[in-house]
Image (cartoon, rainbow, N blue to C red):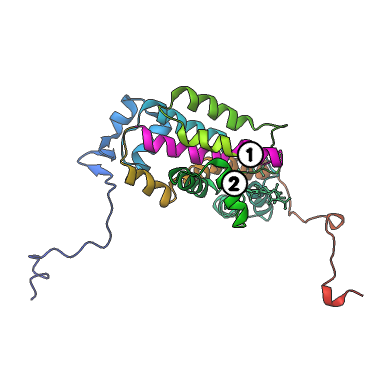
Amino acid sequence: MSLQELGLIRKPASFMTSICDERGQELIYAGMPITEVFKSEIGLGGTLGLLWFQRRLPRYACQFIEMCLMVTADHGPAVSGAHNTIVCARAGKDLISSLTSGLLTIGDRFGGALDAAAKQFSEAFDSGMLPMEFVNKMKKDGKLIMGIGHRVKSINNPDMRVQILKDFVKQHFPSTQMLDYALDVEKITTSKKPNLILNVDGFIGVAFVDLLRTCGGFTRDEADEFVEIGALNGIFVLGRSMGFIGHYLDQKRLKQGLYRHPWDDISYVLPEHMSM
Ligand code: ACO
Ligand code: LMR
């Protein structure tokens, strides 16, 4: 019998984690017993802080995270993800299939630009580029600035979600360097086209960089790593799940039948080789 079979050598663990859920009787979130989580009234934002960032965040940070979840929760039935959830629900699918159908739509163009915006803006800022130089470089490279642009919101039809977050961040964050930089970029892009605003993805992306860098709970490497591994897109995914589930329940409650797109809303384009 080998030493391992005799139980004298511990088998290597099958997977590694830094999240431990139980110690003795109590459920633990990042070292904080669940009774303490409730006693200290850290809310959903603080709970997310414990589970995603593995530390207790300052009160304003917990409030900010909770506000991000609230403002991203829904934007009506017409947006790409909600539309997919609705079509899926109307095809008779279950809650999880309909929810994930919506979630799978999240990406660069829709709700998934937070981390990329955080990266692009902070790389430009950290390298000392002026906002105008950044805009020009992106144009020259043929790249879109993540977190800029919206289909319906513009300087003439401002996005109140962004305004609400901006008021809070300006009042509570110790520093808003990255946000200020992004707002200077927005001044330039909106002077070209009124819908090239700092959108809700972009706002949360840059404000989160300010939060991670200046709240005192993270080293600079840790702050960069959370952006690198996609924590910020997680905020939109989590927030919007609330809305998608709402749309699923709404369709079921309204007993909506199978969706079929109306013919008169489809235009046919002949393949080039078939046109005269
Ligand atoms: N950076 C630079 N230029 C841009 C950007 C951008 N982010 N977005 C649009 N433009 C330019 C286009 O190049 C185009 O220029 P042109 O007229 O010279 O060709 C013009 O603005 C219009 O572009 P459209 O693609 O028609 O803009 P549209 O309104 O359809 O797109 C969208 C909106 C998809 C959000 C787009 O702005 C984009 O991809 N932005 C970056 C990604 C992003 O932030 N996504 C999150 C959106 S917010 C949310 O989903 C909750
Ligand atoms: C959203 O929050 O889903 C939107 O801002 C995107 C859109 O297309 O309106």
Estimate how packed mark 2 is, as few (under 14), some (14 to 19) or many (20 or more) residues with alpha carbons within 10 Å: some
- The residue that appears at 82% across and 72% down in the rendered structure is 271
Which of disc 2 and disc 1 is earlier in sequence? Answer: 2
The answer to whether residue 276 of the structure is visible from this angle is yes
Asked if the stretch drawn in magenta spans residue 192, the answer is yes
Secondary structure of residue under mark 2: helix
Magenta stretch: dominant secondary structure? helix
Q: Is residue 140 above or below residue 125?
A: below
Q: Is mark 2 within 8 Å of ligand 1?
A: yes
**Which label is found at residue 247?**
none
Q: Are marks 1 and 2 in contact (CB under 8 Å)?
A: yes
- The residue that appears at 29% across and 30% down in the rendered structure is 35
Estimate how packed mark 1 is, as few (under 14), some (14 to 19) or many (20 or more) residues with alpha carbons within 10 Å: some
The location of residue 265, given as percent across then percent down, is 84, 54
Asked if the stretch drawn in magenta spans residue 144, the answer is no
Residue hosting label 2: 135
- The residue that appears at 31% across and 25% down in the rendered structure is 39
| Horizontal relation, residue 270 to residue 49: left or right | right
Front-most of 44 and 235? 235
Q: CA distance from mark 1 to mark 2?
A: 8 Å
| Horizontal relation, residue 52 to residue 274: left or right | left
Classify the position of ligand 2 by quadrant: top left, top right, bottom left or bottom right.
top right
**Which label is found at residue 188?**
1
The location of residue 117, given as percent across then percent down, is 52, 46
User: What kind of residue is marked 1?
Assistant: Ile
Front-most of 147 and 269? 147
The answer to whether residue 242 of the structure is visible from this angle is no
Q: Which residues are magenta?
A: 186-215
Secondary structure of residue under mark 1: helix
The location of residue 226, given as percent across then percent down, is 39, 47
